[in-house]
Amino acid sequence: MTTTATGTSPVGSAPAGPTLGTLAYRIVRALARFLLWLFYRRIEVVGREHIPERGGVIIAANHHNSLVDAMLIIATVPRAVTVLAKAPLFRHPLIGPPLRLMGAVPVHRRAEAGDDPRRNDEMFASAIAALRAGRVILIFPEGTTQPQPILMPLRTGAARLALGAERAMGGASRVTLLPVGLVFHDPGTFRSASVQITIGSPVTTADLTAAHRDRPEEAVRAITARLTESISAQIVEAQDQYSLDLLAVLERAWWQEAARRGEPAPPRGEAAESTLAWKQRVMRAGRYLAAREPHRVAALRRKIEVYRSHLDEVGITSAQLGQPYTPSLVVSYVATNLLWLALGLPLACWGIVSHAAPYWLTGQIVKRLGQTAEEEATDKMAVGLVIYPLLWAIEGWLVWRLAGRGALLLFVLLIVPSGLMALLWRERLGRFLRQARAFVWFLTDRGLHRRLLEERGALVGELRELADRVPPEVLGADRVKDAR
């Protein structure tokens, strides 16, 4: 499911008009949106109102998930986006054609450009010309992708583009430098992955435009430092993805305990922003305490791991703790889900049969590619774009040979709906079985929910005690225990 936060429109919607780009661009973007909707369980967008409706814009984002990062930005931003992409990608047989169709600009890193600086001079000239024309440029200033949820030192390309465009326009128009943060959960797993896209306020550059004439390197470094701080404010940095997943478990326990105490929840339109700010405070506190009381931080981490394992064993979520299993609720839930599963079974079975081979083959090919973790999602989408149509064509030919044209027409009409139904049916069945397991646990151990609630309360209580040991200036404006 794809959702959007902070009073913005859903991912995929955009105003009509020339800002949507060429027909080829719109086709590629529509395909990207479909693949993202299919692959990700949840996509949240925060701060879409910061995107200017017109004028040159440089979008600078952190880079953790290979080509998928660019796809997410393209799917989110309602205006056409010119991507600055590594030159080798244009030679990739699957990735290169869409990049060229979208008008992407190749970036030649030092190892790829050799001793000829003119190759990147051309890139800068093309990007500045696009900004002068009021277009949107996407750049990943870290210069490379890596899977860990940290921000690597930024290169100066975004700052040089902003200042170069300002100089080329003679100060007549401002170029907006827009920081974007991407925070992933389980990024490479189909239908388990989720991502939050946070678009921050524009980075201030006007005061450095004049300084750029006399002290160009100083102005570039100053803007790069500001951009680093701005992107850092839009993400949650952790030592690894596993730590970020544990932080999500702790965050859910925190808000659920707050609700039990009757504390107000964040306004619905601000939930994603509140979650991001809460996680950032906790990580700042964790780094502070890890240098002074590492044993207490390690003990809290172990408690989170144990709590999560208990929830997984029972098959229940933290939000479901304490909810009553009344007879009417159980009967209604079982009847509704059994009816839905029964009615969807024929189409789901056909979908599973017709998609089993491409699903299996895609997984096998991706495993043998030997790519890094940050390329996993990109590889699955790219390989699937080839394997699924190819095997569908083979299956369609077999249906035609064995059953005739009428059966082939039915196969073609059902291939996509049956695949989507199979996906939804399996997810619904998985949720139903987890609920059934949780209900059996509840019947056989009536004290289970109480013990898990006590465990969650102790976990949050420990976090509150640790928060009291952290100076307010480390946490920011508000204490962790006051985050609402």
Image (spheres, rainbow, N blue to C red):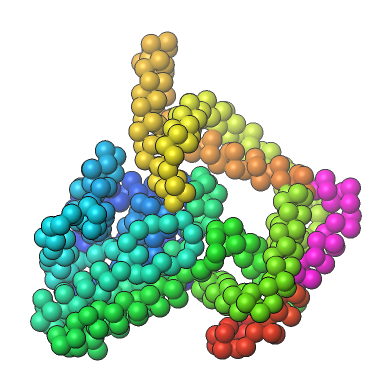
Give the farthest residue toward the front. 115
Q: Main secondary structure of the magenta part?
A: helix
**Identity of the residue drawn at 19% across and 66% down:** 135
| Of 204 and 374, the residue lying toward us | 374
Residue 89, magenta (yes or no): no
- State the image coordinates of residue 94 (x, y, percent, origin top left): 29, 39
Q: Which portion, as a residue range, is magenta?
A: 439-459
> Is any atom of residue 53 visible in this view?
no
Q: In which quarter of the image is residue 137?
A: bottom left
Q: Quadrant of residue 208?
A: bottom left
**Identity of the residue drawn at 44% across and 47% down:** 372
| Of 391 and 428, the residue lying toward us | 391
Give the farthest residue toward the top. 402
Residue 107 vertical position relative to residue 200 in the rendered view, above or below: above
132 vs 242, left or right, is left
**Identity of the residue drawn at 35% across and 65% down:** 142
Residue 441, magenta (yes or no): yes
| Of 47 and 305, the residue lying toward us | 305
Q: Quadrant of residue 110?
A: bottom left
From the image, which quarter does the C terminus lie in? bottom right
**Identity of the residue drawn at 79% across and 71% down:** 458
